[in-house]
Structures are given as C-alpha cells and as structure tokens.
C-alpha cells in the first residue's frame, strides 16, 4: 500500500458519515488492544480555542521533558497534522502501516454500523501513541464531547475552553444544550477546568461537575496572570490567547503533584508555541502583509474583529472571505464587512461552501461603500489583491489551509484537505440520550 492509497482508504470511510455514539469506538479500541488504557490524557473540549490551548499544553509539557502526543482536528493541509508526537507529524509510512493494520479490524462490524472516518482515526492515534510510549497525550475533541469518539478515555483533567454557538444543528440550539454536549467529557472525580462565562452554559457545567463529584475550577479573563507577573504571555497573538494560556497554566498547576513542571518549562513552552492559521501574520517580500485567521463562527469572528480594531487600526484592509454554508455566514459578514475597504468573496474548497455571490450581497448590505469583488477561487482573490497593502484571509479553517499552501508556507497536500469533509449525523446529539 502506498501513502496515496492509504489516504484514499480514509476517504472511503467518509462515506459512513459522522455518527454520535461511543459503541463503535469502544469496540474498535478493544479489537486494537485498548491502547487508551496505557496512556495518560488531558481532554480538551469547547467551541473555540481548543487547538491553541492544546498547543500550549503540549509545548509546556514537552519543554518539561515529557514525550507528548497531540491529537487535533481538523487539519489545515495534511492529514498527518492530526497525529503528532513531540510536534513531529506522523510519517507517511506510519499512516500506511496503521491503515493496513486496521483494515482487518473493521471486518467484524455489520453493514450499517461501520466505523466512521473519525472513529477509525481516533483509535489509530491511540494505538500509535501507545506504541511510541507517550508520557502524556493532549487530546482534543472532534465535535461536542459527550458522544464524540475521543470520549472513550479517562483523563487526568478535563478542559472546556468556552461555550458559544456553533454546530447548532447537531449540538443543540441553546447554549445549555451545547454545554451539555461539551460537559459530557467530565468524568467522575476528575478535575475539570473551564473559561466558559455564559451563565446558561456555566450552570450546566457546574451541575454536571457536581453530579460526578468532579472538582471544578472556573477561570475568568480577569484572572490572567500575565500583567507584571513572572510568566511571559504566549507568543500566539491576540488577547484571547492570554485566557487560553491561563487555562493551560491552571491545568498544569492542578496536575503538579502528578506531573511536575518547572517555571522554566512553562516559560519555554509558552514562548515557543506555534499554532498556524490563528491571527498568523505574514509579510511578503514586496512588503504586503497577509493575516490568516480561521474564524469560522460568530464567536471566533468577534475575536478577529477585536484584534483588527486593536492591533491594525490604521490599516486599509482588504478582506478575502470564504465561509461554509452551515455557519452563520450572514452575521460573520455583518461583523467583518464594515472593517474592510475592499472585499473579495470566494468559494471554500468544500461541498459545504457558501455561495460567493450570496456572501458579496450580504457584505454590500453591511458596507455599501466598500469595493466588493466575487472571485472564482482563492487564487483569483490573491491575484486580485496582490498589490493591496494589508489583506485578511478568513471565514474558514479550510480556506486558511488552502492559503498556507498557495503562499508556500506549507507543503502542498490539497488532496488531503477533503478528508475534513463529513456527512452530518441523521439527528442532533441532543436527541440521542
């Protein structure tokens, strides 16, 4: 089997869609030897900030000398980004080996109950981390938490970054319903930390923690420890990253007796953290600045808007915008369009892409004085904005991943971005009790 053939096999698994439930994942893990029982985890859920928080935790624990596994999704460019050890992507050869080993494990599953792409990849990652004797795995949920395939583990700590509206059609149409799904990662007696601050959502997290006798630690923006303290702020840009970092540091504090971490490791980890596509500023040789940000929901877009207003207030901005149809793209346009002198709408390379013409119409509504162009592709938009001084590319992590390739900042693996596609579950998680 070649790597291309292994990727093609993984593509085939997407035909089985995305199902909420843990039965298949537990069964597949059992067939694979229950690798999760040989590992320690920090399980991270939340609407936004999961990846950044995971990256900070991983960087600090790696600086402390641990062999760290990192499991995240979606990937920006290469499938291999999802499974990393000490921030080294899993090799193509290892992907081929694991796919070959898992193919026979899938045969016992009856028709109509075949494991999905995410379920298979989750257990593949567990097996790989166990084989490589990882000391600690930073473990990000895929969608929700309660019935997400990652929820077959019992972690040292559960982390819920925040609760906001996203994936409402599957997680529920209220913050309480969404919080119920995220709080599903809370395990009996296992400490849980959260920076969620919406009373409706926080109440749910508090109730679940109380029911499971899980110590709960609530963090707020005001508790950020970077003003005049001995710990440097994270190198990731944006004020919101200070809260993500505070959440990571609080987790490390709580686990100190189990995994000691020095102040020097904290400093090294925070100052060296790298997480592409989140307020990532690029300066080209001609002086043009391009800001890449994967804001793909309203909460993330508000963070981007605040960052633009605070850190780039004088810039004449051009906006390249592409959004998925199942997102609240009208509100995203409402938030961003007034900030741009020039707007270029593009289709995201996804079957779920919002129509670029519809995006343009919405942007005209919210900023009639802006020059608005409908582009056939991201390449077209980058060419059209090649002489613009400051360009923001946003609206989807898929679009940001494509931009990283087009700008030569990531090896091309465009055929693998399609592995992020998935078919929606037949009914929302809130209906599956």
Image (spheres, helix red, strand yellow):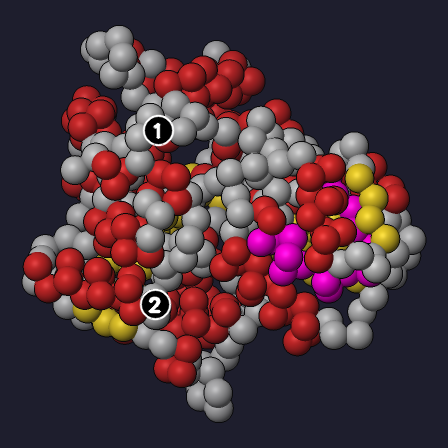
Residue 95 falls within the magenta-colored stretch: no
Location of residue 65 by image quarter:
bottom left
Q: Which residue is mark 2?
A: 198
Q: Which residue is mark 1?
A: 425
Q: Which SS class for mark 1?
A: loop
**x and y, in percent, of residue 326 in the image:** 51, 38
Relative to residue 411, is residue 230 drawn left or right?
Answer: left
User: Which one is in front, 207 or 248?
Assistant: 207
Up-down: is 253 above or below 20?
below
**x and y, in percent, of residue 428 in the image:** 31, 36
Q: Which is nearer the N-term, disc 1 or disc 2?
A: 2
| Total tally of numbered discs in the picture | 2
- Mark yes or no: residue 432 visible: yes
**x and y, in percent, of residue 426 in the image:** 33, 26
Location of residue 195 by image quarter:
bottom left
User: Which one is in front, 124 or 421?
Assistant: 421
Whether tag 1 and tag 2 are in contact, CB under 8 A, the answer is: no
Q: Residue at x 58, y 26 (%)?
A: 351
- Mark yes or no: residue 134 visible: no
Relative to residue 136, is residue 233 drawn left or right?
Answer: right
Could you give the CA–CA distance between mark 1 and mark 2, rounded to whole angstroms?
Answer: 27 Å
**x and y, in percent, of residue 338 in the image:** 72, 63
Q: Residue at x 22, y 13 (%)?
A: 109
* Quadrant where the C terminus is found in the figure: top left
Magenta range = 331-346
């Amino acid at each position: 089997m070649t790597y291309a053939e292994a990727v093609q096999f993984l593509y085939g698994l997407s035909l089985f869609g995305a199902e909420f439930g843990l039965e298949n994942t537990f069964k597949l893990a059992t067939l694979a030897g229950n690798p999760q029982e040989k590992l320690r985890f920090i399980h991270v859920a939340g609407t936004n900030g999961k990846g950044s928080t995971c990256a900070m935790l991983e960087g600090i624990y790696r600086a402390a000398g641990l062999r760290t596994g990192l499991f995240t999704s979606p990937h920006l460019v290469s499938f291999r980004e999802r499974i990393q050890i000490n921030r080294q992507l899993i090799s193509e050869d290892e992907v081929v080996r694991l796919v070959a080993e898992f193919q026979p494990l899938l045969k016992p599953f009856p028709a109509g109950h075949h494991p999905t792409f995410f379920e298979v990849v989750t257990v593949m990652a567990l097996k790989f981390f166990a084989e490589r004797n990882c000391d600690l795995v930073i473990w990000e949920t895929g969608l929700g938490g309660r019935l997400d395939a990652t929820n077959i583990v019992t972690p040292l700590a559960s982390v819920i970054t925040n609760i906001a509206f996203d994936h409402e059609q599957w997680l529920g149409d209220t913050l309480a319903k969404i919080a119920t799904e995220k709080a599903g990662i809370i395990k009996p007696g296992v400490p849980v930390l959260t920076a969620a601050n919406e009373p409706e959502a926080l109440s749910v997290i508090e109730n679940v923690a109380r029911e499971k006798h899980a110590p709960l630690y609530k963090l707020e923006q005001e508790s950020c420890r970077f003003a005049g303290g001995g710990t440097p702020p994270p190198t990731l840009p944006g004020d919101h990253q200070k809260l993500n970092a505070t959440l990571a540091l609080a987790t490390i504090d709580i686990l100190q007796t189990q995994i000691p971490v020095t102040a020097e490791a904290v400093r090294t980890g925070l100052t060296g953290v790298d997480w592409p596509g989140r307020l990532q500023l690029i300066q080209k040789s001609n002086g043009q600045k391009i800001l890449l940000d994967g804001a793909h929901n309203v909460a993330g877009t508000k963070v981007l808007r605040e960052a633009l207003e605070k850190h780039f207030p004088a810039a004449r901005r051009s906006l390249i915008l592409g959004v998925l149809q199942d997102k609240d793209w009208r509100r995203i346009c409402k938030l961003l369009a007034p900030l741009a002198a020039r707007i270029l709408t593009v289709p995201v390379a996804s079957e779920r892409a919002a129509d670029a013409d519809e995006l343009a119409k919405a942007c005209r509504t919210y900023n009639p004085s802006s020059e608005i162009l409908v582009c056939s592709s991201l390449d077209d938009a980058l060419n059209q904005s090649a002489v613009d001084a400051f360009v923001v590319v946003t609206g989807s992590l898929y679009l940001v991943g494509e931009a990283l390739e087009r700008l030569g900042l990531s090896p091309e693996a465009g055929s693998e971005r399609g592995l992020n596609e998935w078919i929606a579950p037949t009914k929302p998680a809130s209906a599956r009790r």
